[in-house]
Image (cartoon, rainbow, N blue to C red):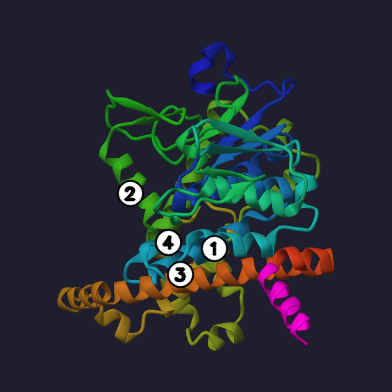
Amino acid sequence: MMNELMGPSEKMFDWDEEWNISFAGCGFRSVYYLGALSCFLQNVPRLVHGASRICGASSGCLVAAALTVGVPIEQFCADVLSVAREARRHTLGVFHPSFSLLRTVRASLLEKLPADAHLKASGRLCVSLTRLTDGRNILVSEFNSREELIQVLMCSCFFPVYCGFTPPSYRGVYYMDGALSNNMPLFERRNTITVAPFSGESDVCPRDGSFNFIEVHYGNVGIHVNSGNVHRIWTSFLPPSMEDLAEICHGGYMDALQFLRERDLLGTRSLCPGLIVETDSVNPACCELVKKRGSEELRLNGLNSDEEEDLCLGLKVEKLPAGIKKVLCEAFRDSRGGDSRGSQLTEFLPVKMVLYLLSLLMLPFEMAFSLSKSLISSLLTSTGDLFRSAWSSGGEDMNSAFPERYAFSSDLRRKQ
């Protein structure tokens, strides 16, 4: 990693060498990367656009894929917040039988990835996979089709049990979460900028003020053993509130800004021509941005400008660019707007206990329904494939596909 391999005399970033950016897997805390990237793109866009490889494992590979194929980070941020909000609506969160994290992510990729996504990603995107049979790490950088790109991303995001029990496959081989074998692809290269939302030895990461005498290495990521990281790992699997997600995103921005200062990259010499004026301009505050949306839109939302301002002031997003700030404010407003009196009632402990008890009682029925639905879907798919294969291959293959049926027909003709 850069922090370990660069001495004080090598603090300056060398633009003459090729460099990579690598994102560790972190579940719902991937909004941290969006804050860090918004800082890079606002201050030193060349650092992102000029990277030779953009790598990732698990949720980190989704961020890397969005960068390489040209999906705006504001749109990706809105998708992450939407998935988190959907998971929080269920009593059991991501473990509710009716909620499938992989299915939700796949649907989003099918909708957002352009038709030529595999062409844009090939050679620049690097995805970490863990082969199921032997646990060996595989890095994939070439994709023959858009569907193959989606398969690779799904394989890297599949965490056993948490995402289900049936692993996805890529080219006929089953894989699981890339973070289980290599959570920081290309970390060993001197010119790789490592980014992780856990305090440790990554180039861009939270800096806890307490002393950290113990450090563990998981999937090539150095993580300090402290209470802050315990909470960060916990909230990687269980979606935090919209307020916490906004704070995580803002933390990513500030940590990336600190990295740029340490590498002396905030000078205008590292900016692309035509972007200097834009990045030097002051972005409007969150509440100012909301006010500019107009009184008509505020009336449609059932809130006046003062109420909108009060909602957005609850978020710590003052340093973020206007685009990311707007997405966070809207998600925060929607989550607050969806809290009816009935939903507020569920915050009382006795009501919570009753709801959890009812959920546990209903869980066997929901699991049986979900399993039956999955089995029926698989049966229909396999039967349809069999009929299509038999029909396309002609009568001879039909006889081989259904020998009993045609033997019975021959017997009838003989009797006649």
Q: CA distance from mark 4 to mark 2?
A: 21 Å
Residue that numbered label 4 is attached to: 315
Q: CA distance from mark 2 to mark 3?
A: 18 Å
Q: Can see residue 231?
A: yes
> How many residues crowd around disc 3 within 10 Å: few (fewer than 14), some, or many (20 or more)?
some
Name which of mark 3 and mark 4 comes first in the sequence: 3
> How many residues crowd around disc 1 within 10 Å: few (fewer than 14), some, or many (20 or more)?
few
Residue that numbered label 3 is attached to: 86
Q: CA distance from mark 4 to mark 1?
A: 30 Å
Q: Position of residue 2 (x, y in %)?
A: 54, 22
**Disc marking residue 234:** 2
Determine whether 44 is above or below 393 in the image: above
Residue 397 placement: quadrant: bottom right
Determine whether 79 is above or below 228 in the image: below
Q: Which element carries disc 3, helix, strand or loop? A: helix
Q: Which element carries disc 4, helix, strand or loop? A: loop
